[in-house]
């Protein structure tokens, strides 16, 4: 049973990564031609243009945190013996790579704030997983619970995307 649930978690993790890349790099666009051709970098944490309201920035920060929570959970599930600092490096490195790719491909604004908030989200995912394992008292049950939850969310998101694709054809 352990191997089967690990296999499912691995598949769901790759689905999550594909969605993460599509959301961050391609901004949920179905055509590469619909992407803004922007190449800018902000190295000052939490520095924003004054033209955009505070509520927008708080929403963006929350979204950046939430989108990386699953990464922390998946890393805890799939790499239980790997040291915490390695998982943190993987989370921050993934975020940094995605931000760098936005700059290289000129398809977004690369921002240190995004790297920081994404990393916080991944750390939150690591913590949530650890707390659930402690509450349940069994790593295998926690893995099954997270796999079922991730499966349901993945099916719902893919179904929604299918509807959107169908409506925009």
Image (cartoon, helix red, strand yellow):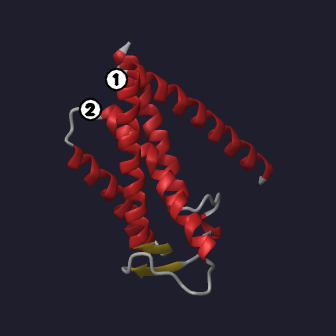
Mark 1 nearby-residue class (10 Å; few <14, some 14–19, many ≥20): some
Task: Check residue 34 in the rendering and tell me which mark sits there, or answer none.
Answer: none
Pointer 2 with pointer 1, Cβ within 8 A: yes
Q: Which residue is mark 2?
A: 80
Name the residue rendered at 65%, 36% in the picture.
Answer: 156
* Residue that protrudes farthest toward the top in the picture: 1
Q: Nearer the viewer, residue 22 or 137?
A: 137
Task: Provide residue 49's location: percent of width, then percent of height.
Answer: 54, 85
Residues 13 and 72: in front is: 72
Rendered location of residue 40, percent (x, y) = 46, 81
Q: CA distance from mark 2 to mark 1?
A: 10 Å
User: Of the numbered discs in the image, which one, if any, rests on residue 139?
Assistant: 1
Percent coordinates x, y for residue 122 in the rendering? 39, 50
Is residue 47 or residue 134 the one in the foreground?
Answer: 134
Q: Which residue appears farthest toward the right when viewing the image?
A: 167
Q: Is residue 8 left or right of residue 82?
A: right
Residue 61, given in percent of the width and then of the height, sits at 51, 64
- Residue at x-position 21% and y-position 33%: 81
Q: Residue at x 67, y 45 (%)?
A: 161
């Amino acid at each position: 049973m352990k191997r089967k649930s690990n296999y499912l978690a691995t598949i769901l993790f790759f689905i999550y990564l594909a969605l993460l890349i599509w959301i961050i790099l391609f901004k949920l666009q179905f055509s590469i031609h619909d992407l803004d051709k922007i190449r800018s970098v902000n190295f000052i944490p939490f520095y924003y243009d004054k033209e955009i309201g505070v509520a927008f920035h708080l929403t963006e920060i929350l979204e950046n945190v939430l989108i990386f929570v699953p990464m922390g959970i998946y890393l805890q599930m799939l790499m239980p013996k790997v040291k915490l600092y390695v998982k943190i490096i993987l989370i921050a490195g993934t975020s940094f790579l995605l931000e760098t790719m936005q700059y290289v491909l000129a398809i977004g604004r690369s921002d240190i704030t995004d790297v920081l908030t994404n990393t916080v989200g991944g750390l939150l995912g690591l913590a949530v997983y650890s707390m659930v394992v402690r509450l349940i008292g069994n790593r295998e049950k926690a893995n099954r619970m997270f796999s079922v939850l991730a499966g349901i969310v993945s099916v719902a998101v893919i179904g929604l995307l299918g509807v959107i694709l169908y409506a925009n054809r």
